[in-house]
Amino acid sequence: MSVDRVEEAESAGTSEAVAAAAATAVTYYPIAPGVRLNVRSGPGTGYSIVRVLAEGSKVPIYCQTPGTTVTGPYGTSNIWDNIASGEYVADAYVRTGSDGYVASRCS
């Protein structure tokens, strides 16, 4: 096997390990009981609703960003949680156990 192919294989193995570690590091948080939560296309109530989460859902938080201030079961906050590409929910409806950021800021 050529040196280039060995380096590619090692690189691929490292990338897979990094991806696997990142995937296992994501924590899922429950949304407030009895709530069907709007998922929006951006961090604010002015963004369109892309789907609605069912009662009892749990969401991953990949990053967080400031947006529209919302009052919900877990207080009043301007923090929005990125739960998938182009999908945000108001942190005031997610039980994170904190009034502040629990994930990195979205870039």
Image (spheres, rainbow, N blue to C red):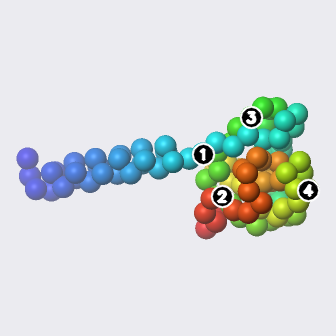
The amino acid at mark 3 is Ser
Classify 10 Å Cα crowding around label 1: few (below 14), some (14-19), many (20 and above): some
Q: Nearer the viewer, mark 3 or mark 2?
A: 2
- Return the disc, 4 or 3, that comes first in the chain's sequence: 3
The amino acid at mark 2 is Val
The residue wearing badge 1 is 27
Is residue 6 depicted above or below 78 in this figure?
above
Q: CA distance from mark 3 to mark 2?
A: 18 Å
The residue wearing badge 4 is 71
| Residue shown at 77% from the left, 60% from the top | 99
Q: Nearer the viewer, mark 1 or mark 3?
A: 1
Q: CA distance from mark 4 to mark 3?
A: 19 Å
| Residue shown at 42% from the left, 44% from the top | 20
- Return the disc, 2 or 4, that comes first in the chain's sequence: 4
| Residue shown at 73% from the left, 63% from the top | 100
Q: Say which of 32 and 4 sits in front.
A: 32
- Return the disc, 1 or 2, that comes first in the chain's sequence: 1
Residue 86 picture location, percent across and down: 68, 53
Residue 44 picture location, percent across and down: 83, 60
The residue wearing badge 2 is 102
